[in-house]
Image (cartoon, rainbow, N blue to C red):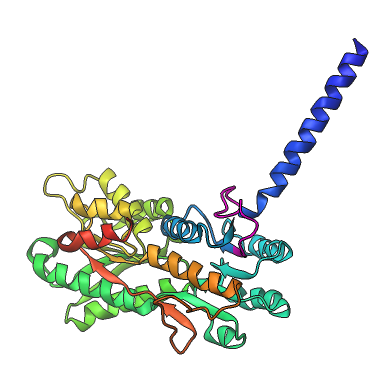
Amino acid sequence: MLKKKKGLVLSLTIASSILLAAGCSSSTSGSGDSAGSKDSKLPAVGATIYKFDDNFMSYVRRAMENSAKGKVNLMLNDSQNDQAKQIEQVDTLIAKGAKSLAINLVDPKAAQTIIDKAKPKNIPVIFFNKEPDANVLAGYDKAYYVGTTSSESGVIQGELIAKAWEANKAKWDKNGDGKLQYVLLKGEPGHPDAEARTKFAVDTVKEKGIQVEQLAMDTAMWDATKATEKMDAWLAKYSDKIEFVIANNDGMALGAIASLEKAGYFSGDKFMPVVGVDAIPEALEMIEKGKMVGTVLNDAKNQGKATVELATNAAKGKDVLDGTSWKLDDKKAVRVPYVEVTKDNIQVGKDAYK
């Protein structure tokens, strides 16, 4: 009996060791699903996303994985909104032989640290979605950026707000004072997109000759749940004084809508105009249902595609634009354009996620 027990323990120990070894071998991807990882002959691209459960970045990730298939071994990591973790992941990716890096920074200020790790080994770096300081990109000849022009999304959102307000002013100006009273859900403080969208959206509305009054503004860190909590508090404080909800992204817009629905909005005559940015499928559904005025397409599909195409060329030692339709601006950046999306042209948003 004792021999049998010893044999069983030994078998379990060996089995556990095998499982642990297998677990270690797949840990680089962070998601356990590293596109192209089964083909070791493909050049390796080490990639990080600041957090996988961000609404918008989940679609960028999908586009990256699709673009990588059969072209590169994409070692994809979830940095879980932890900059220290992301730095460790970069070290691991370099150690595993990444020929180029595609980095969605947790903190844009950490770009130089990433470059300091890649540069001695001559590894190209493609930053995406969160733009580093221009001086950081300029300081390394193999550093590039894929993203957008942050101010453009704010301007387009402001134009959308102004058009919607002018068309519905009689219904939406609840106190009849001619001013647009708004609350604004801001993304991560210091993030270039959050700062630009906040400034340019409101400035553009003012430039259209519309008087505005800010009732409240606070960060919800791009997060739907945090946005619901903020909106709950604002409704308790300001109630019907709020005439418009402006959100830096669709995730927060959806969070605001969840709060508004609890308060009885979007049924009967009770309505609140809400706008966001990204044009994610969940937001497009809200626009179709009449619970959201509009959004601004932040083209996840093309941002993911461009990132992988540049990183693939870089990994193969080619010019990053070789065989692509992309162009670099004077800051070594590929800029994917934004597009206004309302009920009238909602197919534009849907097509971006096909």
Residue 136 placement: quadrant:
bottom right
| Relative vertical location of residue 50 with respect to residue 336 in this rendering, above or below | above
Q: What stretch is highlighted in magenta?
A: 30-46
Q: How many labels does the image show?
A: 0
Look at the image and tell me in which quarter the N terminus lies.
top right
| Relative vertical location of residue 177 with respect to residue 140 in this rendering, above or below | above
**What x and y, as percent, mark residue 46?**
61, 64
Residue 123 placement: quadrant:
bottom right
Residue 247 placement: quadrant:
bottom left
The reply, left or right, for residue 114 in relation to residue 1 is: left
Say if residue 33 shows up in the picture: yes
Q: Which residue is drawn at 18% across and 63% down?
A: 345
Look at the image and tell me in which quarter the C terminus lies.
bottom left
Q: Residue at x 33, y 75 (%)?
A: 337
Q: Answer whether residue 136 is magenta in the image.
A: no
Q: Answer whether residue 41 is magenta in the image.
A: yes
Q: Residue at x 66, y 50 (%)?
A: 27
Q: Which of 119 and 36 is in front in this view?
A: 36
Q: Which residue is drawn at 35% across and 78% down?
A: 199
The reply, left or right, for residue 309 in relation to residue 350 is: right
Q: Which of 34 and 53 is in front in this view?
A: 34
**What x and y, as percent, mark residue 237?**
31, 56
Q: Which residue lies furthest to the top in this view?
A: 1
| Relative vertical location of residue 162 with respect to residue 224 in this rendering, above or below | below
Say if residue 242 shows up in the picture: no
The reply, left or right, for residue 1 in relation to residue 17 is: right
Name the chief secondary structure element in magenta.
loop
